[in-house]
Amino acid sequence: MAKTKTAFFCQHCGSQYSKWQGQCTSCKQWNTIVEEVIQRPTKAGWDSQQPLSKKAAKPERIRDISAQQDRRLDTGNEELNRVLGGGLVGGSLVLLGGEPGIGKSTLMLQIALKIPFKTLYVSGEESAQQIKMRAERVHPDSENCFILTETKTQNIFRHISELQPDILVIDSIQTLQTDHIESSAGSISQIRECTSELIKFAKETHTPVILIGHITKDGNIAGPKILEHMVDTVLQFEGDRNHIYRILRAQKNRFGSTNELGIYEMQGSGLREVVNPSEILISKIDEGLSGTAIAATLEGMRPLMIEIQALVSTAVYGTPQRSTTGYNTKRLNMILAVLEKRAGFKLGAKDVFLNVTGGITVDDPAIDLAVVAAVLSSNVDITVDKGICFAAEIGLAGEVRPVTRIDQRITEAEKLGFSSIVISKQAKLGKTDHGIQVIRIAKVSDLVRHLFG
Ligand code: TYD
Ligand code: MG
């Protein structure tokens, strides 16, 4: 078979080379040279039987195009449906990324087993027996799920034409290999070629394709960045492997909002959808512990109550340690500086540890006030009343700033049985008759007075 012609290009300056080298000789950048296809044999990848010319797109007047929503396939998994924006869109490519062991294969296999459509689960990572063993744990018995252990795209497409699945799952894109490129599986050019073959297949047959992708050490999906541009939806599966909760969020979604998120709990029998996340993120210990405070945060569109824990202790080494889990360390340093300057707390010689419980990472600035409350509570060793929660941002001048969607946060706090919520004095409330005491403060020093008298 005629091989594809490839060449090596610097991704930085565009210089072309006949073979790979570590440094680009013209722009002197390192590791920017990748193999790219410059000429492909005419019959490559997925080829539908019909000549393309009949199907080729024609210019259409925009007012003649029907705005009808694509029919969405219900995945049978509420959390995933919501993150996708209401289900899988026909012909769309979804890329699911996440760290090894986080549960990507488990999630997709679970969907494949449960969904009432014919699904082909292609695995290049595990044997059919391994998958069967996992399937027995999560959801034994399914009529519609087919397993194929294959990595060559040409073979996969051959099986697809026979089986005609409604949904295709690829585990993982990094293990696929096309005949048309010589480089090894997982290389940039292989990933790109295989993805474009799959896109062609998805768009021509209107079959949704879910790709599982590995991520690199720094948290990006392995392979060319262009992979994320090529697909319609990029989902990220995250969480701490040592914790049982997992969060699924959309980084990019052509068919829905990227604000939604799904929460799962990893159990012995697979991933369980967590319908009311706030309840699990707050510890059920009745007697108060100093150093904990509850924040009313929003993850996407969803209100979420999370517990912040702080430990402030005298530094044992010369330089005090500041360590955080699930929260930005720089932001903690800023808050400590504000507390020192604006509220007179001498925290400069203290070790401060901060933890967002449940192993999730939050970057909503509205948890600042809960961080302050937790730090102060640990510092003076006085508990924060369990019935209080917090939702406000802290500014550099020590001012307590309003945050978005405050009404939604208050409603969630009320629903979960909190007796009061501390917010910014400047917050504009949509409605004033909340069934929970709303405490408005203007400065961090007000909080000190409020919490500890
Ligand atoms: P896996 O889906 O293989 O992760 P990925 O494909 O993202 O690499 O997840 C495997 C982990 O999940 C593994 O450490 C075991 C755990 N697990 C459970 O706790 N319960 C289960 O029912 C299953 C199937 C896996
Ligand atoms: Mg896997």
Image (cartoon, rainbow, N blue to C red):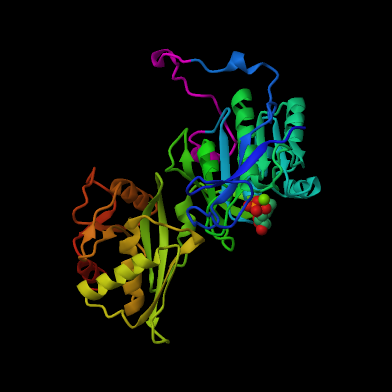
Residue drawn 57% across and 32% down? 74
Name above or below for residue 173 compared with residue 99: above
Task: Give the quadrant of residue 202.
Answer: top right
Q: Position of residue 409 (x, y in %)?
A: 33, 50
Let me know if residue 84 appears in the view.
yes
415 vs 108, left or right, is: left
Where residue 183 sits: x, y (%)?
A: 69, 46
Work out whether residue 388 can be spotted. Answer: no
Decide whether residue 72 is among the magenta residues: yes
Read off the magenta span. Answer: 59-86
Q: Quadrant of residue 87?
A: top right
Q: Nearer the viewer, residue 65 or 38?
A: 38
Name the residue nearer the viewer: 70 or 306: 70
| Extreme residue in the right direction | 129
Counting from the top left corner in percent of width and height, residue 180 is at 71, 36
Q: Residue at x 77, y 34 (%)?
A: 155
Split into 4 quadrants, where in the image is the N terminus?
A: top right
Q: Residue at x 70, y 48 (%)?
A: 184
| Residue 424 to residue 411: above or below | below
